[in-house]
Every structure is written in C-alpha cells, then in structure tokens.
Amino acid sequence: MNIIEQRVANSSHRLNPAVINAVVIHHTGQYELSSIFNTFSNPGSWASAHCVIDYDGTIYLCVDESKKAWHAGASILHGTADVNQFSIGIELRGDGNLAAYPDAQIVSCTDLVADILRRRPMIPLNRIVGHEHVSPGRKTDPGKLFPWRAFLLGVARAA
C-alpha cells in the first residue's frame, strides 16, 4: 500500500479508543484532493475521515485511528448511534453513483480494510458498511456502483 500522511485538523477524542468495531466507506464527490484536505481542516465543516483513497490507489492518512474523525454525522449502526465514536471512516475520491471506482482504488481500499481487520479482529464483515447504511435516506455513498460483493470477499480473503 502506498500511504502518505496528510494530517488534518478536524478530529476529536474518542470516548473509548479501544472500542473500534466498524468501518464506514464514503465517497468525496468530484472534488480535488486539496479541496478535500482543506475541508477536513476547516472546523466549520465538521467533516473529516481517517483516510482518503485517490483514483490511483494512493492512501492519504488524515486522522489517527485512535481519534474520532467526523465522517458519519447523524448515524446509527445495529442500534448504536454516533457511529463516529466506534468506527474508522474511509473516503474514496469520486462518486460511486456517477462512475465506477478504478480498480487501483478498490484494491487499495480492500487492502486497507483487510489490514484494519488484521489489527482489529473484533470487526466482523457485517460492520464494514457504507455511509448509506448508517445514514439511510440522508446519504447515498459510496454509491450504487461500489462493488460490495467483490470488495467484501476480497477483504475476507486478505484478512
């Protein structure tokens, strides 16, 4: 994996950093990387993610996993609200409702999530979800063109 540190300001302390038991996949829309990182450092945006994955598969580490990134907003997963408290947020550059994600981007996302699961084996596959799953009716990302089946099978094989 090609990982570049690109720290951003928007994050806060988790109530319990030991309890990270979900991964949420997002999309950034069609924004340039510089705009994404600027948004993630603007306190008024209330937005950030732990990682951003560019079209070429480069992974940008924005917020340390021990901290709470501000990626899910009003959200609930399996009956528990405030998904940001217990999840890792990954942004895919692009919009999976408009165009398929490049293979290199999906491979990097698969590798990254498999790595997270190897380090955090308490995360089951059914807690690797999209923003659309934790904020239904409010969000649609990573989008209808995200290859969920192939992605989760790849994560399971690699983890």
Image (cartoon, rainbow, N blue to C red):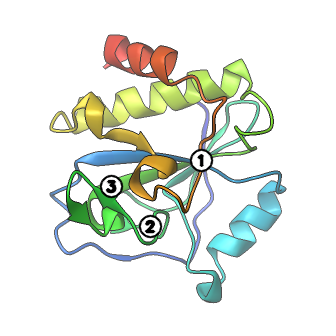
Asked if 138 appears above or below 146 in the picture, the reply is below
Circles 3 and 1, Cβ within 8 Å, touching? The answer is no
Asked if residue 2 lies left or right of residue 81, the reply is right
Q: Is residue 53 left or right of residue 151?
A: right
Along the viewing direction, whichever of 49 and 143 lies nearer the viewer: 143
The residue identified by callout 2 is 69
Q: Residue at x 78, y 56 (%)?
A: 33
Pick whichever of labels 3 and 2 is earlier in the sequence.
Answer: 2
Indicate the quadrant where residue 107 lies. Answer: top right
Q: Earlier in the sequence, mark 3 or mark 1?
A: 3
Q: Secondary structure at mark 1?
A: loop
Measure the alpha-carbon separation of dots 3 and 2. Answer: 9 Å
Q: Which residue is mark 3?
A: 87
Residue at x-position 15% and y-position 38%: 122
Tell me if label 2 and label 1 are in contact, CB under 8 Å: no
Q: Given the image, on which type of amino acid does mark 3 rest?
A: Ser
**Toward the viewer: 124 or 140?**
140
Local packing at callout 3 (Cα closer than 10 Å; few below 14, some 14-19, many 20+) is: many
Tell us which disc is closer to us: 3 or 1. Answer: 1
The crowd level at tag 1 (other Cα within 10 Å; few <14, some 14-19, many 20+) is many
| Displayed quadrant of residue 152 | top left
Q: Which amino acid is tagged 1?
A: Asp
Q: CA distance from mark 2 to mark 1?
A: 17 Å
Tag 2: amino acid: Ala
Residue furthest out toward the front: 137
**Dot label at residue 141:** 1
Of callouts 2 and 1, the N-terminal one: 2
Secondary element at tag 2? loop
* Badge 2 density bin: few <14, some 14–19, many ≥20, Cα 10 Å: many
